[in-house]
Amino acid sequence: MKFFNIDQHVSVISDVAHIFKNLGHEVDDWSLSGHHWVVNKQKKEIKLNDNTFLTCSGICSQELCDLFYETYKDELCKYYGFICCYPVEFALLYEKWNKPIIIVNCIRYEHPNTENKVLWDRLNMFLIKKYEEKQLYYICNNKGDLFYSKYYLNIDGIHIPNLCEYTNEKYTGTEDQFILHNRSHIENVNKTKYLHVDQIKDKNWRYTWKKLYSYKGIIHVPYHNSSMSIFEHYTANIPMFFPSKKFAKELFYKDKIFADLTFYRLYKLEEPDDENNPNRLSNPAILDKWIDTCDFYDEENMKYIQYFDSYDHLTKLLRHVDTKKISELMAEHNVKRKENVYNSWINILKNIKNKYDL
């Protein structure tokens, strides 16, 4: 089967396309991402019949979707179905082809329409309609988006973590220091033990996965409940260090972690009135739910992550931890983890083929 995708993010669709290729399927990807160079993609200019170009957001209007269809109805009719990763609203572009749509949701699905109730409602109605028609396959790469989408859409999504094998690199640990990853901040830790990731970038402000994976391990104080970098690091068997759940909650109340947990938080919007709304982070039960569904606390999927209860505790971990042994255990677990992910995709693709083959 051959699928089509337009995406603003390079990593999620790269992972899906890699898996599909290994399973004997194809994905054509038109990238709108400014980070297209990371995975050696070309950035696509998507020209419409009125001589305008499709941009990275605001495509929820019916007028724009109709224009996209009229421009590409013949070119895209050859595809078996469509894949939509980031943002989810791109799924609206494909409605008129009346073919399977696979959502791979990696962030709060309403983005970029959090502050636009009309467009958010339109997206909700579309997703619910397609799901009820059994034409929409709703996958989340993290468990937080499962409960978030369930609240707003009443959709029972499928959890399939990303693997990110596209880096084609594995952990070596030859350098005797740790890396503090992007957008992470720690205090009172011996700086001879770690480098900030910016310190390994070249003159073009870039680094290679091979270089990154040569360090003893990576410290994360995450800005989000999930990230593609975390998937990349785990699949490469890199020892990783995260605040424990208890410490993460302490840091949250000090605004030191999870800055992008929801777009309500990121944009500093007034929280919804409903205590059960996933955007009501002032409700301790909702915050606990978000923390419990973070990828890096999911021991079913990501075993052997190291947790620190304080920065002093982190200092001790960095001094005494056996990174080689941790990496070996991760490598063993990654065999099973890969098997689970591939089996999940095999089942979905088999279902699509059985259902839509004439």
Image (cartoon, helix red, strand yellow):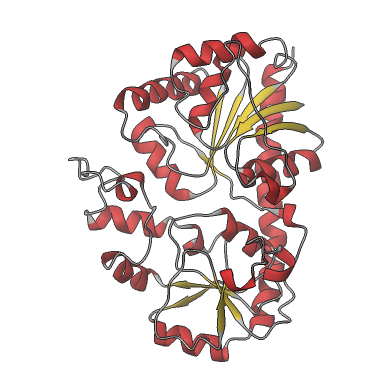
Q: Nearer the viewer, residue 38 or 50?
A: 50
Residue 30 visible (yes or no) = yes
* Quadrant hosting residue 305: bottom right
Q: Position of residue 354 (x, y in %)?
A: 71, 22
Q: x and y percent of residue 169 in the render?
A: 76, 63
Q: Is residue 180 left or right of residue 164?
A: left
For residue 301, above or below residue 13: below
Q: Is residue 340 left or right of residue 300?
A: right
165, above or below 109, in the image: below
Q: Tell me if 142 is positioned left or right of 49 in this view.
A: left
What is the total number of numbered labels drawn onto the structure image? 0
Which corner quadrant holds the N terminus?
top right
Residue 134 is at least partly visible in this image? no
- Residue visible at 71% across and 27% down in the picture: 3
Q: Position of residue 103 (x, y in %)?
A: 56, 33
In this view, the residue in front, 223 or 345, is 223
Residue 319 lies, with reference to residue 82, above or below; the image says below
Vertical comparison of 123 with 73: above or below: below
Q: Quadrant of the C terminus?
A: top right
